[in-house]
Amino acid sequence: MTEPSPDAHSKRRWWQQLLGARIDLTPLRTSRDFRTLFVGGTVFNLGAMFGYVAVPYQLYALTSSNLAVGAMGMVQLIPLLFFGLYGGALADHVDRRKMLIGTGVAQTVLVAVLLVNSLLGQPQVWVLYVVGALMSAASSLQRPSREALIPRVVGHHELPAAVALSSIGGQIGMLVGPAVGGLLIARYGPPVAFGIEALGLLTATLMLGRLHRYPPIEESRPPSWSAISQGVSYAVGRKDLLGTYVVDMVGMFLAMPIVLFPALATEVLREPAMLGLLYTAEAIGAVVATLTSGWTSSVFHHGRAVTLAAAGWGASIGIAGLMPNAWLAIVFLALAGGFDTISGIFRGVIWHQTIPDSMRGRLAGIEMLSYSIGPLGGQLRSGLVADLTTVRTSIVSGGALCVLGVGATAAVLRDFWRYDARTDVHAVQQRDLRTQRDRELAATDEPSS
C-alpha cells in the first residue's frame, strides 16, 4: 500500500488547521435555547439598527442642528447608568425569560410610538428624546438578563464558542442594518425604517417567548442599592474580573477615533467617498475574527489573551492614523476591529466561566457600563486632542497610549495577567458545580430551570 506523500500530509495538516480555526457551531447544535437566543438576538439587533439610523436622521431633518443630534447620546446615557446596574440586580432575582419578553414588548411599543410620530404632519422633536431615554432604559434592563442566560443554556466547555457566536448577531446588524436602513430612509423616509424596526423587535420577542423558564438557581436578593453594591464589591475584589473591565475602558478611552472619521476622510486623506468604508472597516474585521475564532477554545490564559488583543487594537488604530491613503487606513481599522472582537471573546469567557449564577446579572450590568462609558469618553478625548493638535496626532497618540495603558493595567493587576482557566479557583468551582447539569443538558437537550 502506497504511503501518502509529504505533500499530502502537509495539505491534510493545513486543512485540519483551517477547520480548527473556523467558528465552532457546537452550541447551535446541542442547545435548543441557545439557538433561540441566537436567532432571536440577531433579529432583534438587526431591527434595532434601522432605528439607529432613522432617529438621528429625523432629528437632523427636523432641527438642522448637529448639537440636537449629539444631545441624544447624553439623553440616553443617564438611563444607561442607572438602569444598567438595576437591570443587573433584577436579572439575578427574577425569571430571565420574563425579563427578555417584558423589555422586548416595551421596546416594540416605544418604536411604534416613533412610527406614529413620524407619520404626523409635523413630527415632534420632544417625542424622539423621551422615547430615546425610555428605549435606553428598556435596553439596559434587558441586556444583563440576556448575557446572564448564556451560561445557563450551554455546557461549560461550550462557552468560548457560545460567546463568539453571540457576537455574530450584533455584527450582522451593524453591517447590514445601517446600510439598508440608510437606503430605505433616503427613498421612503423614516416611517419605513421605524416600521421595520417595530416588526423586527416584535418578531424577536415572540421567538424569545419559546425559551424555557430561568428563575434564580439559588436564593436571591430583591433589587436594591445593597444588592448592587454587593455586585460592585465582588467585581472590585476579584482582580481577574477587574482587569477585564479596566483593560476595555482604557483601550476604548484612549483609542476611539470614530468621531474623527469625517475629518480624516475629507481633510487629511482627501477621499470623502471612503467615509462609509472607514465606518464599516472595524465591523468587517470583527466578522472575520469571529468566523475564524475556533482556535480560542484551546487558549486558557485568557487574561494574557485579552491584554495582547487590546494592545493589538491600540497598535492597529495608531498605525491606521499614519497611513497615507484611505485603503491602507481601512486595512488597519479592520485589523483593529478583529483584535477588539478577540479581546471581547476572551473577556466574555472569563465572565461566563467564573461568575456564580447568583451574581451574573449584576456583573453583566457592570460589564455593560464598562464598554459603554469607555467609548463615550474616548470620543471626547479624540475630539479634544484633535482640536488642540491635529487629527493624525490624536489617532496616533491614542493608539500608542492605549498600548502603554493596557500594558500598565496588566502589570498592576497580576492576577488578571496570570489567569488560567484550568486552575483558577473560581473557574474550577463553577466547572465542578455545573458538571451534573452539563451531563443532563447533553443527554436531554433540556436546560435546567
Image (cartoon, helix red, strand yellow):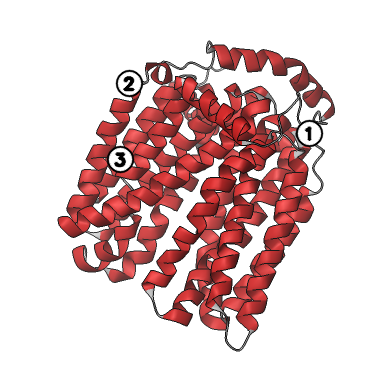
Callout 2 touching callout 1 (CB < 8 Å): no
Picture residue at 27% right of the left edge, 57% below the top = 383
Circle 1 — which element? Answer: loop
Along the viewing direction, whichever of 250 and 337 lies nearer the viewer = 250
Q: Nearer the viewer, mark 3 or mark 2?
A: 2
Q: Residue at 44% across / 21% down in the picture?
A: 239
In the picture, the quarter occupied by the N terminus is top right
Q: Secondary structure at mark 2?
A: helix
Q: Nearer the viewer, residue 435 or 404?
A: 404
Evaluate whether residue 353 shows in this view.
Answer: yes
Marks counted in the figure total 3
The residue pinned by badge 1 equals: 215
Question: Mark 3 and mark 1: span between their CA atoms?
Answer: 40 Å
The image quadrant of residue 214 is top right
> Quarter of the image holding residue 263?
bottom left
Q: Which residue is mark 3?
A: 314
Instruction: State which quarter of the image contains the C terminus.
Output: top right
Badge 3 amino acid: Gly
Residue sitting at the far bottom: 121
Image coordinates of residue 446 in percent, x first then y, are: 83, 31
Where is residue 104? Give x, y as percent: 71, 55
First in sequence: mark 2 or mark 1? 1
Q: As displayed, is residue 224 above or below residue 398? A: above
Reading the image, the residue beneath label 2 is 412
Q: Earlier in the sequence, mark 3 or mark 2?
A: 3
Q: Work out whether residue 98 or residue 197 is closer to the camera in this orientation and state it.
A: 98
CA–CA distance between discs 2 and 1?
Answer: 38 Å
